[in-house]
Amino acid sequence: MNRRQVAELAGFQIVWLGCALGAAYGSSAPGIIAAGMFVSAQLWLQGSRRAVIGPALASGVAGLVAETAANAAGLLSYSAHWPYDGLAPAWMVALWLAFGSTIPTTAALLGKRPIIKAAVLGALFGPLAYAAGARLGALQMTEPVWIPAAAIACTWALVFPALVAFAQSAGRID
């Protein structure tokens, strides 16, 4: 892993923390600003803007749909609801956009069979990220917690590899 990859992945973790802490304190602004700065940096630093834009937008749409569905199903509720209670909050969609901008790097780091690895990693780390966000106060998972955790695992086991496959098919990663 080279310095740029380390910086990119560390930067995403900072965005995640900004989104979660901002939401925990009732504001979408810190997360949206952090994600906007991160995606802007990604567009500036990556060799190809096309490599960032496609996966980021696909991820943003997937996040809007997945988070809105989880909220509508009563699996999750969010601490900062802006702009509308019935939709995924803007800070969460911004987080998904930032995540999508890391797909080319992440997929390259996964090496051979990145789609299979993305499914496994998504199923494992997706619920952990949401549990951490819940502990910080950014969201609430309904009881019993294993039900939303299982739904999150399934969602991430499908969405993460789909984003990797999209990036591969569009020639955005090796």
Image (cartoon, rainbow, N blue to C red):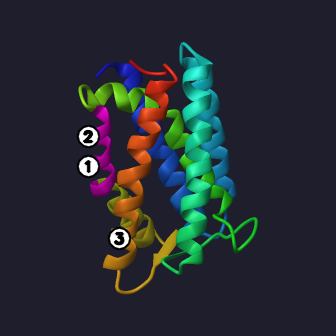
CA distance for labels 2 and 1: 5 Å
**Depth check, front residue: 35 or 58:** 58
Give the residue displayed 75% in from the left and 70% down from the top: 84
Q: Is residue 72 left or right of residue 29?
A: left
**Depth check, front residue: 17 or 164:** 164
Residue type at the position of mark 3: Ala
**Depth check, front residue: 90 or 23:** 90
Q: Which residue is mark 1?
A: 120
Residue type at the position of mark 2: Lys
In this view, which residue lies farthest toward the front?
Answer: 169
Identify the mark nearer the N-term, 3 or 2: 2
In this view, which residue lies farthest toward the bottom?
Answer: 143
Give the residue displayed 52% in from the left and 46% down from the top: 15
Q: What span is colored magenta in the figure?
A: 114-124
Residue type at the position of mark 1: Val
Q: In this rendering, does residue 33 appear at all?
A: yes
Binning the other alpha carbons within 10 Å of mark 2 as few (below 14), some (14 to 19) or many (20 upward) gives some
Quadrant (top left/top right/bottom left/bottom right) for the C terminus: top left
Please tell me whether residue 172 belongs to the stretch shown in magenta.
no
The percent position of residue 49, horizontal first and vertical second, equals: 61, 20
Q: Main secondary structure of the magenta part?
A: helix
Quadrant (top left/top right/bottom left/bottom right) for the N terminus: top left
Q: Say which mark, if any, is on residue 153.
A: none
Binning the other alpha carbons within 10 Å of mark 3 as few (below 14), some (14 to 19) or many (20 upward) gives many
The percent position of residue 17, horizontal first and vertical second, equals: 48, 53
State the SS at label 2. helix
Q: Which residue is mark 3?
A: 149
Q: Which residue is mark 2?
A: 117
- Quadrant hosting residue 173: top left
In the displayed structure, would residue 51 be above or below residue 81?
above
